[in-house]
Image: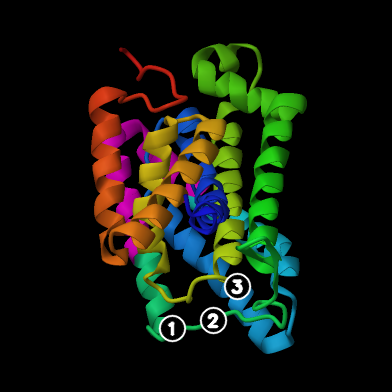
Amino acid sequence: MDWQVIINGILLGGLYGLAAVGFSLIWGVMNIVDLTQGAYLTLGAYITFWLFKLWGIDPFLTLPVSALILFGLAFLIESQIIKRVLRYGFVMLLVVTYGLNLLLQNAMLVAWSADYRSVTPAYSGAGFSIGSVNVPYIRLALFIAALLLVGLLTFFLNKTRLGNAIRATALNRLAANLVGVRTEFIYALTYSLAAALVGMAGSLISMVYTVSPSLGGTFMTKIFVVTVLGGFGSLSGAVLGGLILGITEALTASYIAPGLMNAVSFILLVVILIFRPQGLMGKQFYGA
């Protein structure tokens, strides 16, 4: 077994998991599929790029900036658009979030063109070796940062008052309302928190992928596959799904052909949907 390939897959899978956590959180609490997540990820990548290019700010230090900007933008979108469309059901929300994604993507295209840009800090080429396995410092740092962010989210949901309110709303919105939880605010908070997370994922991704308006479209497919693999609404499932997809892609690129990575990911998605539609760590779908 080529351990270099496995390590590369694990390090990449951590990023996939972080990118999918917000998507899974929105599904678990609000029961909607938010296709705007791809645009939020791209915006996070651009925020890091411009802060690095214009002022030389270290990419890791841009994470709070990406989180705050995306949190504010998503809070505005949820309170002014998503909230008004919730009553019309799943399909309408799918159409609206798809439209929002296109709007934001084309706004970025107009503002920054389709040029590919890179975030290359001085330490981007450094690494260390363990036997025959080479571990780049930056990919290891990205993996650790992704796990820390997921861990902080898990702590927030399990150990804080607001986190408990989010979990209560996810379990039963009507019951949460009856005990005094402001579920409309909880929906806005959840949506904004998810955008902040995927924005930080975009910031991290910008250090290993080129940045362009189409970045989010590429990752949206991966986010969906990871979420289905792990189970809709399961944060730990999103991390596990990310690791599985990362390792699968690394093995495919190494032993079959790099051009078939997306095809293998799609096959993996279909297999999971056929044999375990709730995902590896998800619960049965509502009403099942």
Label disc, if present, on residue 116 of the rendered structure? 1
Residue 18 lies, with reference to residue 275, above or below; the image says below
Q: In this rendering, would 31 be left or right of 196?
A: left
Which quadrant of the view contains residue 204? bottom right
Tag 3: amino acid: Ile
Identify the magenta region.
78-102
Q: Nearer the viewer, mark 2 or mark 3?
A: 2
Q: Which residue is mark 2?
A: 118
Disc 3 and disc 1: Cα gap in Å?
Answer: 14 Å
Q: Secondary structure at mark 1?
A: loop
The residue drawn where x is 34% and y is 53% is 221
Residue 278 is situated, as x and y percent measured from the top left of the image, at 36, 24
The residue drawn where x is 37% and y is 70% is 214
Label disc, if present, on residue 47 of the rendered structure? 3
Q: Nearer the viewer, residue 142 or 191?
A: 142
Lower sequence index among marks 2 and 3: 3
Tag 2: amino acid: Ser
